[in-house]
Amino acid sequence: MTVSEPGDVVARPIHVTETLTADVALGAVTADWDADQAVTDLYMAHYRSLVRLSALLVRDVATAEEVVQDAFVAMHGGWRRLRDNDKALSYLRQSVVNRSRSVLRHRTVVDRNAPKPPPDMPSAEQGAIAIFERDAVVSALRTLPPRQREALVLRFYGDMSEAQIAAAMSISRGAVKSHTARAMSALRMLLERDA
C-alpha cells in the first residue's frame, strides 16, 4: 500500500511498514533516554550508599565498587523490563546483595582450590652450614670414649630420659649424668678448638 503526502511537489511513496518501523525506533530512543536519565539520577543519589552496603558484605571497597557498577549496568540494560520504575532502588539493592553473595561464593571456591604454598626451604648457604656443623659434631663424637658417646647419642638423638638411658646401658642414673656431663664438656672443647 503506497500513500502520497499532500503538498509535496515530488511525492515519495511511503509504505506502511516504514511508518511502523520509524514509530518503534522513535519509541526505543525515548525509552533509552528515559533509562539513561533515570539510571543517572539513581546513580547520583544512591551510588555511595550502595557501595557501603556491598563493602560491608564483601569487606573490600574496590570489589564493592565493581559490584555496584555492574548492578547499574544491568539495570540500564533491563530498564524496559522493569515493571515499576518506583521500585528501581529496591531492585538495585537486591542486585547489589546478590552480586556480593556471588563474589563471596567465588572467593570461597578459589580459596578452597588454591594450591598450597611450598614449605619454606632453607637457602643453599644454610644447608651447607648445617651439613658442615653436623659433620663436625659427628666427627667430634667419634673421638669420645664409647660410654660417653653412647650416653650423648641416646640422650640427644634418641631423645631418651635418664632412666631409659640407664636401663639401655645397664648403669645407674648417676653414671648417666656423669657420662653425659663429661661428654658435653669434651665435645664443647673439641668443637671450639676446630672452629
Image (tube, rainbow, N blue to C red):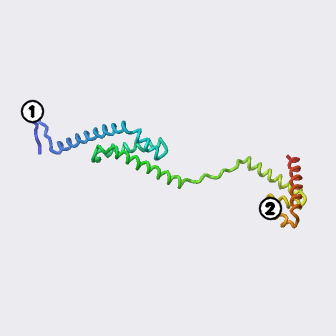
Residue under circle 2?
Answer: 161
Residue under circle 1?
Answer: 7
* Residue at 84% across, 58% down: 152
Quarter holding the N terminus is top left
The picture quadrant where one finds residue 26 is top left
Amino acid identity at mark 1: Gly
Amino acid identity at mark 2: Ser
Q: Residues within 10 Å of mark 1 (few under 14, many from 20)?
A: few
**Front of the two marks 1 and 2:** 2
| Nearest to the observer: residue 194 or residue 55 | 55
Residue at the farthest left position: 6
Q: Position of residue 115 (x, y in %)?
A: 57, 54
Q: Position of residue 30 (x, y in %)?
A: 25, 39
Using the image, determine if residue 142 lies above or below residue 128: below
Q: Residues within 10 Å of mark 2 (few under 14, many from 20)?
A: some
Find numbered disc 2 in the image and state the secondary structure of the residue it sits on: loop
* Residue at 34% across, 39% down: 42
| Nearest to the observer: residue 105 or residue 143 | 105
Residue at mark 1 to residue at mark 2: CA–CA distance: 118 Å
Q: Position of residue 48 (x, y in %)?
A: 41, 38
Find numbered disc 1 in the image and state the secondary structure of the residue it sits on: loop
Q: Position of residue 155 (x, y in %)?
A: 81, 59
* Residue at 46% across, 45% down: 56
